[in-house]
Image (cartoon, rainbow, N blue to C red):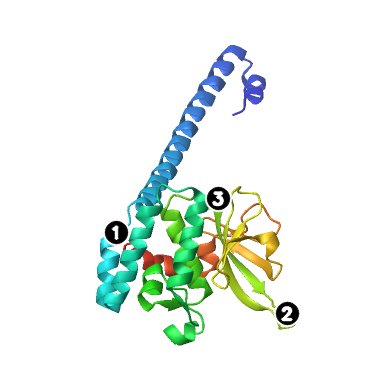
Amino acid sequence: MGFERCLKSQGLAHNCLTMWYLRRSRLKTRLRGLWLGAWALVFGLSLVYVASLAEPNLDKMQALASQRYGAGAAQTVAAWRQLIEESRALSDSDKVNKVNTFFNRRILYKTDMEVYKQEDYWATPLEFMGNGAGDCEDFVISKYMTLQMLGITNEHLRLIYVRYKVGDTPPIAHMVMGYYPQPTGEPLILDNMIGSVRPASMRSDLTPVFSFNSEGLWVPGASASAADPTARLSQWRNALARMREEGLF
């Protein structure tokens, strides 16, 4: 019963005013409790997510590399771990350059059909380093996960699906890594086809189609996420699940 309706039906302004304030106070207390509970849950889940990223089981990953792929793969994972340790104190731009150089120089480009006998397969960093080869998505995923482990947050990182065109040849589907020094500014592009990291304005051969990370999916020109990437991209969802099993987070 609302305050005005109570006054008309009862004619007892003082009593109704008291009742109305009591009800409103109880409702506000209940809602405050629900909000606090919800925020506590979100905050708790966020802490679990951050903690899981901060403490990957790299010993497990190296053991799996040796078991599944052999001594050469274990050495690659060991070199990757050394890269992470040596890069922790660097500036973000230096981290980006070192991670880009590590994967571009150490891992070969091969198609999914050559490596996995599938048309499209998004490899985990362990699978990528274990096989010593992969396609553009595999380079990008490993760079993205490594940069996150080095403390660069999602607002600065996106996996960008593009159309790549050279000369008069038809454009091909391609994926690159975008590092945004300023979250709303121009990204620097990490690409397995080019050794150096370059601003997007210097990559006229690339036309962005959409971008994503572990928190959202964006179309060109949009500032807000258009969808949940794990719901829309099954390959990304499956790769994340395998990373979890392998000890990456």
Measured in 3D between alpha carbons, the distance from the residue under mark 1 to the one under mark 2, in whole angstroms, is 45 Å
Measured in 3D between alpha carbons, the distance from the residue under mark 3 to the one under mark 2, in whole angstroms, is 33 Å
**Can the viewer see residue 245?**
no
Image quadrant holding the N terminus, namely top right
Q: Which residue is mark 3?
A: 155
Image quadrant holding the C terminus, namely bottom left
Measured in 3D between alpha carbons, the distance from the residue under mark 1 to the one under mark 3, in whole angstroms, is 25 Å
Q: Amino acid at mark 3?
A: Glu
User: What crowding class fits label 1: few (fewer than 14 Cα within 10 Å), some (14-19), or many (20 or more)?
Assistant: some
Task: Give the image location of residue 99, x and y in percent.
Answer: 46, 61
The residue positioned 38% from the left and 74% from the top of the image is 127
Q: Is residue 247 left or right of residue 170?
A: left
The residue positioned 43% from the left and 69% from the top of the image is 239
Of the residues under marks 1 and 2, which one precedes in the sequence?
1
User: What crowding class fits label 2: few (fewer than 14 Cα within 10 Å), some (14-19), or many (20 or more)?
Assistant: few
Q: Are marks 1 and 2 in contact (CB under 8 Å)?
A: no
Q: Amino acid at mark 1?
A: Asn
Q: Amino acid at mark 2?
A: Gly
Task: Give the image location of residue 23, x and y in percent.
Answer: 52, 25
Q: Which residue is mark 1?
A: 57
The residue positioned 69% from the left and 79% from the top of the image is 171
Q: Is residue 135 left or right of residue 205?
A: left
Residue 228 drawn above or below residue 27: below
Mark 2: which secondary structure? loop
147, 88: nearer the viewer: 88
User: What crowding class fits label 3: few (fewer than 14 Cα within 10 Å), some (14-19), or many (20 or more)?
Assistant: some
Of the residues under marks 3 and 2, which one precedes in the sequence?
3
Q: Which mark is residue 170?
A: none
Mark 1: which secondary structure? loop
Q: Which residue is mark 2?
A: 167
Task: Give the image location of residue 110, x and y in percent.
Answer: 48, 82
